[in-house]
Each structure stands twice: as structure tokens, then as C-alpha cells.
Amino acid sequence: MEAVADFSTLGALLGLVIAIILIIKKVHPAYSLILGALLGGIIGGGGLVTTVNTMVSGAQSMMSSVLRIMTSGILAGALIRTGSAQKIAETIVDKMGEKKAIAAIAIATMIICAVGVFVDISVITVAPIALAIGKRAKLPKESLLLAMIGGGKAGNIISPNPNTIAASEAFSVDLTSLMMKNIIPAICALIVTILLASMLSGKANGLKVEDSDCDTGENALPGFLPAVLGPLVVIILLALRPIAGISIDPLIALPVGGLVSTLVTGNAKKVVEFTEFGLSKVIGVSILLIGTGTIAGIIKASMLQYDVINILETLNMPSFVLAPLAGILMAGATASTTAGATIAAQTFAPTLMSQGVPALAAAAMIHAGATVVDSLPHGSFFHATGGSVNMSIGDRMKLIPFEACVGLTSTIVSVILFLILG
């Protein structure tokens, strides 16, 4: 395959490797990605001017996603600060009971993430509830954390979260349609999560939940109906496009849901406080996406995508395999679902569509693939989730293969659905 590119494959890959090393060395991920992009472009033979222009262009391509993510902070902030997310989780766990605690914890985390709370915040929100019920039911921390992480992964691929927004933007597909496309893979991932977490619950040498792990503080929570009303408004607004042909952009739907949640829970006077809190939760991922855009620009303008296609053709593998494979590799490299899905989608969207893979199916497969090895130790998700249950790094690492099985399940199902339905 002949193609013209500004940078070599070696340069793009070395830039990504440099970024990974810097992230592991605790340099801020955004700066790591920017420096990796700069060095990768220069090593790749693009020259300083071309490299910088490509980095700027790549960062500019992320602006629509960044705007939507920043406004989504209004919803996330409202759900967290009003206690709505905690109320939803507690209600699910209480209704299902201790005998079904693992399933209840997984479903609660899945739903909270699916309605627009970031996956790491979803785990942190459910963790105190999970630890309390885990202590009563004598469930080990490994089982509890896997249930939350797996549930979060399942919810993440059907949510209006940054990764979904970035993938939909790259492929120019409707956000709601992309969320709906992965419903069946998400359910399958949830089932596998419950099975694996239940298996871990029988470990004789599992980590016990101690009294010091449990948060005994009582917070005044809203009723269940006010708690779910904000997310319901978001779902209804986003669903208007496929149902009635009325397009409500997430830029509007997400903050409207947040304001509704704030008002119906009796916190009208705290709107500014909650929005500022929400912004503080999304500003990090917004900055990360700008850094991600710089290296995505270099990779997209390199020979990498053409060389990968040539390898697939040499191995007689179908072109659609590129979608899940790109999601898996890029998320593993960056230890981030958002960064991985963004780089993979930005880089390979034109190639996949030119090869005849439908945009919606390709976006869904990349998105699912980005949840397989996104929780490696050089990313923040690994440490945030381990810290939520007071788990050591060594014990936290033992869960990575189980998490990968959950993500791999949704990826395989997403690919199967593409092969059956197209």
C-alpha cells in the first residue's frame, strides 16, 4: 500500500514509548504525551515546523470533545455532591440484599457510570457502600473491588463519558447510537464480572474488610426519585434523536441533567458550588485530551496506520480486526480508556472507513477494546481504585488479569455483533 505521510512509523512508535516512560516516571500525562509527540515527530523525520504544526492541529481536533466533557462536569458534580449517585447505589444494594451483594455492587457501579459519572469516580462513590456490606457478608476486598471495576467498565462503554464522546467525535457518529451499540457487550461484561467476582469471594486467604476501611459517617441523601431524575432527563434528551429525529447535543443535554438534579434535590442555592466541583473533576481529563491530541496528530500523520494495514493483509487478517486491536493497544500504552480510545479512533477512523468498516461498528469495537488493559499501574485509574478500598499495589496488580477478562468479553461480543449485524 503506497501512502504519503509526514512521519515514519518508527518515529511515531518511539514518541509513544517516550510518553509511556515519562508517565511511568510520574511526569504529568499531558506533558508526557506532548513531549513524546514532539520527539516522535522529529525522530520520525517531519522537521520541527511540521511537527509543531501537526501537534497543534491534533490538539485542535480535540476541542469539540473537550467542550462536551467540560459541560458534562455539571452533571457529574451534581450527582456526586447532591448524594444522588450514592443514593442510587444504596438503593440497588438494599433492594437486592446481602445474598446478591456482588451482583448488586456491580450493577450499582455500572448504572452510576452509565449515567455520566466517570468510571474511577463511580468506583470511589460505591466503595464505602461495598466495604460496609462486604464486612457484614464477609466478602474479601478483591471480590468487592473487581465487582466495582467490572461494573464500571460495563457502564463506561454505554455512557456519555469522555471516552465515548471522543470516539463518537472521531467517527462522526451520534453519541446515543454509539452508547446503544454496546449495550449487549456491556451486559455480557457485567455477567462475567459477577461470575469472576463471585469466584474470588470464595478465596480462603482473601483480604478481609477491616473496621478502619468502613466509612461510618451518615450523609443526608435525597429520595430515590429526585436522585434519578437528572440522569433520566439526560437519557430522554439524548434519545430524542433516534426516537423522534430531534437532535439535542450532549453539550446541552448533560448540563441540563445536572441542573435538574441540583434543583430537584433542593440545592438550588448551591448550583455554582456544584458546577465548580464538577469542573474540578473534568479539568484533568480535558487537559489530558489536549495532550492526547498532540500525539494522536503525529500518529495519524505517520505511516503507522498504513504499515499496520499491510501487516494485516500479509497475515490474511480482515481489516476490521484493526478496530479492537487499536483500542486494546493504545489504551494499554496510555493506561487510560479515554486516551486510548481517542488515539485509536483519531488515528484509524479514516483507514477503517476506507476499508468498508461501518463507522458506528468501528467506533464501538475500538471503544470496547479500550477497556481491556486500561488499568495498568502507570495510569491513575489503577491507583485511584486500589486506594478506594485501601489495597496495596501488589494486591491491586493481582486483579489486572480479571479486569482484562471483563474488557475482553465486551470486545469479543462487540466484534461478534459486527460480524452478525454489520
Image (cartoon, rainbow, N blue to C red):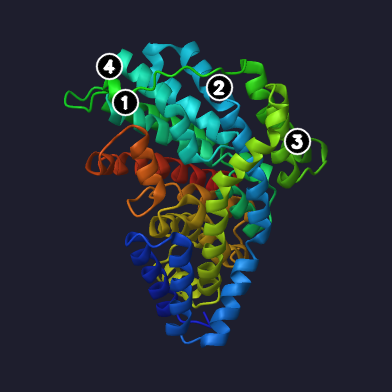
Query: Number of numbered discs present?
Result: 4
> In which quadrant of the rendered view does residue 279 lie?
top right
Q: In which quarter of the image is residue 248?
A: top right
Name the residue carrying label 3. Answer: 237
Instruction: Identify the mark nearer the N-term, 2 or 3.
Output: 2
Disc 4 from disc 2: Cα separation:
23 Å
Q: Are marks 2 and 3 in contact (CB under 8 Å)?
A: no
Observer-nearest of 59 and 296: 59
Look at label 1 and name its amino acid.
Answer: Asp
Mark 1 in CB contact with mark 3 (< 8 angstroms): no
Classify residue 249 as left or right of residue 317. Answer: right
Q: In this view, does 281 lie above or below 227?
A: below
For residue 187, say whether it is visible: yes
Could you tell me how far apart the alpha carbons at marks 3 and 4 are, in whole angstroms? 42 Å
Q: Mark 2 points at which residue?
A: 88
Residue assigned mark 1: 213
Question: In screen coordinates, is 240 left or right of 307?
Answer: right
- Give the mark nearest the N terminus, 3 or 4: 4
Mark 1 nearby-residue class (10 Å; few <14, some 14–19, many ≥20) = some
